[in-house]
Amino acid sequence: MKRCSWCKNDKIYIKYHDEEWGVPVFDDNKHFEFLILESAQAGLNWLTILKKRENYKKAYENFNPVTVANFNNKKFEELIQYEGIIKNKKKIKASINNAQKFIEIQTEFGSFNHYIWKFVNYQPINNLWNNESEIPSKTKLSEVISKDLKKRGFKFIGPVIIYSYLQAMGLVNDHIVACFRHKQIKNLDFK
């Protein structure tokens, strides 16, 4: 069974690759979770974040955007000291700010899910990469979305982070064609 080579032989990576990466997501809390995790990943590798995912889930109270939006200075200080998450003050401040902006988008569009999927006309983009070296780190689409989110006040949300997020949330299927998951995801009936 052929997989994308980035998951190597690590059990956590393989499970994530085989069960989550590239599968279309329509749940706002899952979108919020990955906006936090992808932003935390900036400058690090994704495996580092996956290994800390449960700690993030606890620290960010199951990734509830309303709860996170109401984190006060005391909670911010607790997060700076929280064992098992990336203790970057700018990233943590951005996550609280982004929760507030996330809620604004939910209010405006009815859900974050509706907002984000409109960028791809509610259809996943199924790319046809033969090897991973072809896969870009950002695209015009991720630049447009990043620019729009920044205009709405989001922080730590550049086009590379957004492209990783789009791949993770299944708006883009970037499994290489030879990977067994490419065809499975392409053939999902997600509506």
Image (cartoon, rainbow, N blue to C red):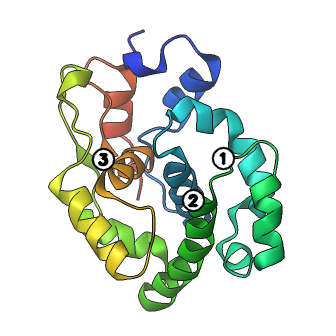
- Of 36 and 33, nearer the camera is 36
Which comes before the other along the chain, label 1 or label 2? 1
- Of 191 and 165, nearer the camera is 165
Figure quadrant of residue 58? bottom right
Quadrant that contains the N terminus: top left
Q: Viewed as shown, does residue 52 lie left or right of 22?
A: right
Residue at screen point 74% across, 52% down: 57
Helix, strand or loop status at disc 2: helix
Q: How many marks?
A: 3
Which comes before the other along the chain, label 3 or label 1? 1
Q: Can residue 3 be seen by looking at this rendering? A: yes
Residue at screen point 70% across, 39% down: 52
Q: Amino acid at mark 1?
A: Ile
Residue at screen point 46% across, 41% down: 43
Q: Which residue is mark 1?
A: 86
Q: Viewed as shown, does residue 171 lie left or right of 79?
A: left
Spatial CA span between label 1 and label 2: 8 Å
Image marks 1 and 2: residues in contact by CB distance under 8 Å: yes
Q: Is residue 1 above or below residue 25?
A: above
Q: Given the current orientation, which residue lies at the most extreme bottom position?
A: 108
Spatial CA span between label 3 and label 1: 27 Å
Quadrant that contains the C terminus: bottom left
Q: Which residue is mark 3?
A: 172
Q: Which residue is mark 2?
A: 91
Which comes before the other along the chain, label 2 or label 3? 2
